[in-house]
């Protein structure tokens, strides 16, 4: 058998195995077996940092701190509220009618109340939040690991990114186009410390910090941690969304992967 034929066969076997695996698994398990990872392995292209992560998942945990380390005051940054009438109405009702919508490339679109999220497995972590502006604060966060929500929604194989749509109009355009949004890749989406937090320092998440739900992605900078999350979407590409760079600040020039 020639080298080329061997390679082709190996590729076919890998693709076949990846597709078969994808049919049996949902959520994060399936994500790490998708054909896209195999394509990167096969291609001669230089391995970028992102691609390396896809091949050799970095499972390392961000440092966690003790209760005594919690900052007396945690700075609130960026939007500290939303002026969206629908959001304000939900806030006035104590978020009883708020629902997190989960859609896009999923088998099972979801609408989850705060009570639904609180019934799911939870994780509490005391971590340091580093803002790109140069300040840090330590806080305690409790929420549901994003992995559990994605597993329940069952991602479809082409999904590669998770996008978070927020209620606040930081761009002040008066339209959807100015609203905060963010995105992360599947490795961070399935990382155990990536949670949708509803409590901060043992209390319901306050409005300045993103009530009723905000993302924590502990190995990245503060701007990735979307506050006022209303909707989550699984997508194959981020370049077709808004400015095409995967987030509010990214569209204005910040790095998409904001590793610490
Ligand atoms: N929806 C939304 N999320 C956001 C922002 C924002 O303005 N709107 N600012 C980001 C930035 S730059 C930081 S540092 C953190 C601040 O979170 P905090 O207010 O809890 O400190 O939220 C991030 N997430
Ligand atoms: Mo920030």
Image (cartoon, rainbow, N blue to C red):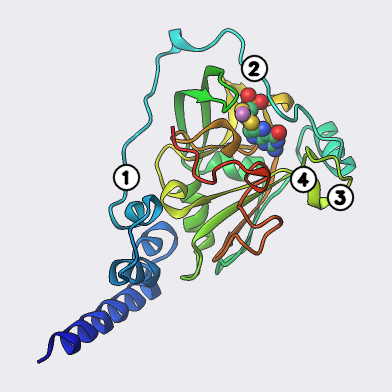
Describe the element under mark 2 as helix, strand or loop: loop
Q: Secondary structure at mark 3?
A: loop
Quickly name the residue at label 1: 58
**Tag 1 secondary structure:** loop
Q: Name the residue beneath numbered marker 4.
A: 179
Mark 4 → mark 1, Cα distance in angstroms: 31 Å
Q: Residue at x 61, y 45 (%)?
A: 116
Q: Establish whether ligand 1 lies closer than 8 Å to the Cβ of label 3.
A: no
Asked whether the residues under the numbered discs 4 and 1 touch, taking CB atoms below 8 Å apart as contact, a structural biologist would say no
Q: What residue does disc 3 label? A: 175
Q: Earlier in the sequence, mark 3 or mark 1?
A: 1
Residue 205 visible within the image: no
Q: CA distance from mark 4 to mark 2?
A: 21 Å
Disc 4, disc 2: CB below 8 Å? no
Image coordinates for residue 112, horizontal then vertical, percent: 64, 50
Q: Is residue 185 shown above or below 209?
A: below
Residue matched to label 2: 75
Nearer to us in this view, 179 or 135:
135
Gap in Å between the C-alphas at discs 3 and 2? 27 Å
């Amino acid at each position: 058998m020639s080298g080329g034929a061997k390679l082709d066969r190996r590729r076919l076997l890998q693709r076949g195995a990846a597709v078969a695996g994808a049919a049996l698994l949902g959520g994060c398990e399936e994500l790490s077996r998708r054909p896209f990872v195999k394509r990167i392995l096969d291609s001669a292209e230089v391995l970028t940092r992102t691609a390396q992560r896809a091949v050799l998942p970095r499972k390392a945990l961000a440092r966690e701190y003790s209760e005594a380390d919690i900052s007396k005051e945690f700075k609130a940054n960026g939007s500290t509220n939303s002026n969206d009438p629908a959001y304000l109405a939900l806030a006035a009702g104590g978020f009883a009618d708020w629902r997190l919508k989960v859609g896009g490339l999923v088998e099972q679109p979801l609408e989850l109340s705060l009570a639904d999220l609180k019934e799911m497995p939870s994780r509490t972590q005391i971590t340091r939040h580093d803002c790109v502006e140069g300040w840090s604060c330590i806080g305690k966060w409790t929420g549901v690991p994003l992995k559990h929500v994605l597993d329940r929604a069952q991602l479809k194989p082409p999904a590669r990114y998770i996008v978070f749509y927020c209620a606040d109009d930081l761009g002040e355009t008066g339209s959807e186009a100015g609203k905060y949004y963010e995105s992360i890749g599947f490795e961070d989406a399935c990382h155990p410390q990536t949670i949708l937090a509803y409590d901060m320092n043992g209390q319901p998440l306050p409005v300045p910090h993103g009530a009723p739900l905000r993302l924590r992605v502990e190995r990245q900078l503060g701007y990735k941690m979307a506050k006022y999350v209303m909707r989550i979407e699984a997508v194959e590409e981020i370049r077709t969304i808004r400015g095409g760079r995967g987030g509010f600040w990214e569209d204005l020039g910040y790095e998409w992967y904001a590793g610490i």
